[in-house]
Amino acid sequence: MDTLVSVVKSHPGPAVLVFALIFRLIHRLLQRLPVPKVVKQDDTHTWKWKNLSVSMVHSLLTGTWAMTCAAIWPETLRNLHSFHTPLSYLLVCVSTGYFVQDAGDIILTGHAKASWGFLLHHVLVISCFMYTLYTEVYVAGAVVALFVEVNSVTLHLRLLLKLADDRCSFTYYINKHINIITYVTFRLGTQFYLTWYIIQNYAWLDHALYFLISIIMMNIMMLVYFYRLVRADFFPRKKEKSVGQNGACNNNSKKFPCD
C-alpha cells in the first residue's frame, strides 16, 4: 500500500487518468448486465442507466471508504487542512479519477447541455481535489466531502427506479424516506460542516477564498436540488400524484414528478 501511494503521490495527474480508465472499464463491464426493457426503449434513458450504474459503484466504494477513514482516524474530522493517511490520499485520487471519467462521458456522449449542472459540480470537485493531490493539503477535507456519497447511494437508487418505471413500488416508497434522511445528514450536513470549517479558519487556510466560493456554489446547488427533491417525492402536484399512503400505485394515474 505504501509503495502504491508513494507512486501515486509522485505522479498524481497520471494516476488520476489511470483510475479514470479503470472506471471506464467498469462502465464497459456493467453494459453486460441486463437492462429493464422500458429503459431500452429510450436512448437517453439507456445512457442515464449506464451512467448511474457506474456512479453507484463509485458511491458505494468511496462512501464506505471515507466513513472508514474517519472511523479509524478521528483526526480526519478535526484537522481538515493538514491531516492525511496513505489510504485517505489514495481515496481522493480514486474519486478524482471517477469524476474525470464521468465528465468525459457526459461531454463525449453529447449530454453536456442537458447536464450542465453536473458538469459544473464536477469541475469544482476536480479542481479542488487536484489541488489537494498536488499539494497534499486538505486531504482530510476531501475525505469528509466524500461523506456525501453515502447519500448518493439512495439518490442513485431513486433515479434507477424511476428509469425502470418502478416509482410506485414499496422499494421506492421506503428509499425516498431514507434518501431524505441521508440527504440532510450526509450531504447538507457535510457541506455545512465544510463551510463552517473554512469560515472559522479563514484567516490562515491556504487559498481559503477559492474553496469558500466553490463550496458556497455547491451549497446553493444542493439546496435547490433538495427543494426539488422534497417537492417531487412528498408534495407532488395533484394531477401527478401516483403513490398512495402505503406506497402503492393509484390505478388511475401513471404520472410521477420528473425531478
Image: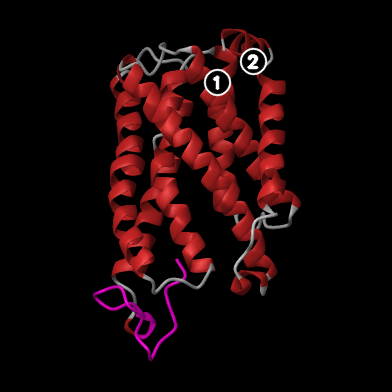
Q: Which mark is residue 183?
A: none
Q: Looking at the picture, which amino acid does disc 2 mark?
A: Val
Q: Quadrant of residue 242?
A: bottom left
Vertically, is 34 above or below 196? below
Pinpoint residue 109: horizontal percent, then vertical percent: 74, 55
Q: Which residue is mark 1?
A: 90
Point 52% across, 47% down: residue:
56
Q: CA distance from mark 1 to mark 2?
A: 8 Å
Can I make out residue 116 in this image? no
Closer to the camera in the image, 59 or 120? 59
Characterize the magenta stretch by its predominant secondary structure. Answer: loop
Decide: marks 1, 2 in contact (CB < 8 A)?
Answer: yes
Vertically, is 152 above or below 126? below
Q: Quadrant of residue 104?
A: top right
* Magenta stretch encompasses residue 184: no
Q: Residue furthest bottom?
A: 252
Secondary structure, mark 2, is helix
Task: Give the total of numbered labels.
Answer: 2
Magenta stretch: give its range: 239-259
* Magenta stretch encompasses residue 250: yes
Q: Which residue is mark 2?
A: 8
